[in-house]
Amino acid sequence: MRTVCAMALVGVAVLVSTPAPAHSQAREEAGKSPAPLARLADGQPNVQGIWAASLGGSVSLTNPVSQAQDFEKQNVRLPSRIIDPPDGLVPYQPWAAARRNQQAIDYAWPTRPEHLDTQHRCLLSGVPRLYTIVPSYKIVQTPGLITFIWSDYHAYRVIPLDGRPHVASNVKLWMGDGRGRWEGNTLVVDTGNVIGARLTYTGDFYSDNAHVVERFTFSSADRMVYEATVTDPTVFTRPWTMRAEQRRRPDEEVWESACFEGVVNPDEFLIKTGPRQP
């Protein structure tokens, strides 16, 4: 994968927010006993606080390097986020695979605004992508509700836990319409009503017909495994599941981010001269 110099400003910003390498985090946590989960008055596991992906990066689902690693053209190969199918690949229909491949080319050599990834333009990324990015998010719990808040993109999700039905199927939302329930220490969120969106910089995507079942499994007060099963018969040949481990960041704070719709002029990132690169 290649990232053009036109992405420099975004790349520098991501370099600053790149998390510590996984091996250094592992050394710091070696020998520590997992903190048990406390409970709130309404019985929910208390998972409030700041969380982030252990290995943040939404360049690719099958090689989830950070944008900093991609920007520096590091020769890194990471395990695929896809755990089903077993081959670690997204099961695209032929037309959708061709579109994804073209979007990967356009990402590397953008000449039109629509070639830019939505995240570069500070547009909402939606689910499951927001659980793979580098920036952290905050979980807030109140009776009957759980809320996720990202400073980046000014994004948030308010998920009812009271069993209420989804909104009408013709109502499409950038973050989808989530309905949650607790199964022990696992929060299960059924998300529909999504707007078709990019899932990675390199062009993975789903359509308005996608349906996502998310599972947030908290093994301790500080660790969580996020899994999302995506079903979209318009784009994929079968449902597929991705996984991204998450960790609590007790020493972090959520600060306002100046990344929101309209703040970026797409023309600043476009290639205007020179031959198209493969």
Image (cartoon, grey):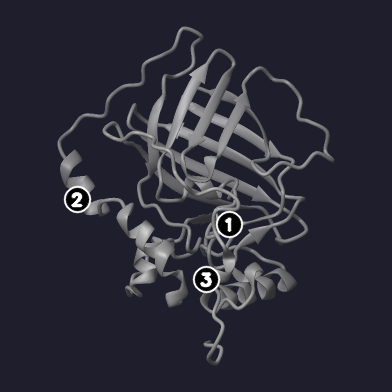
The extreme bottom residue here reads: 275
Name the residue: 25% across, 51% down.
20
Per the model, the C-alpha gap separating discs 2 and 3 is: 34 Å
Which label sits on residue 269? 3
| Residue 205 in which image quadrant | bottom right
Instruction: Please state which of the two labelled residues, at mark 3 or mark 1, is closer to the viewer.
Output: 3
User: How busy is the neighbourhood of tag 3: few (under 14 within 10 Å), some, or many (20 plus)?
Assistant: many
Residue 115 versus residue 62: which sits nearer the camera?
A: 115
Name the residue: 78% across, 59% down.
234
User: How busy is the neighbourhood of tag 2: few (under 14 within 10 Å), some, or many (20 plus)?
Assistant: few
Location of mark 2 (residue): 24
Per the model, the C-alpha gap separating discs 3 and 1 is: 20 Å
Location of mark 1 (residue): 199
Name the residue: 75% across, 51% down.
208
Circle 1 SS class: loop
| Residue 9 in which image quadrant | bottom left
Kind of residue sitting beneath label 2: Ser
Q: Going from the N terminus, do you reach mark 1 or mark 2 first?
A: 2
Kind of residue sitting beneath label 1: Leu
Residue 61 versus residue 74: which sits nearer the camera?
A: 74
User: How busy is the neighbourhood of tag 1: few (under 14 within 10 Å), some, or many (20 plus)?
Assistant: many
Kind of residue sitting beneath label 3: Phe
Which label sits on residue 81? none
Mark 1 in CB contact with mark 2 (< 8 angstroms):
no
Name the residue: 72% across, 40% down.
192
Q: Going from the N terminus, do you reach mark 3 or mark 1 first?
A: 1
Q: Is residue 65 visible?
A: no
Circle 2 SS class: helix
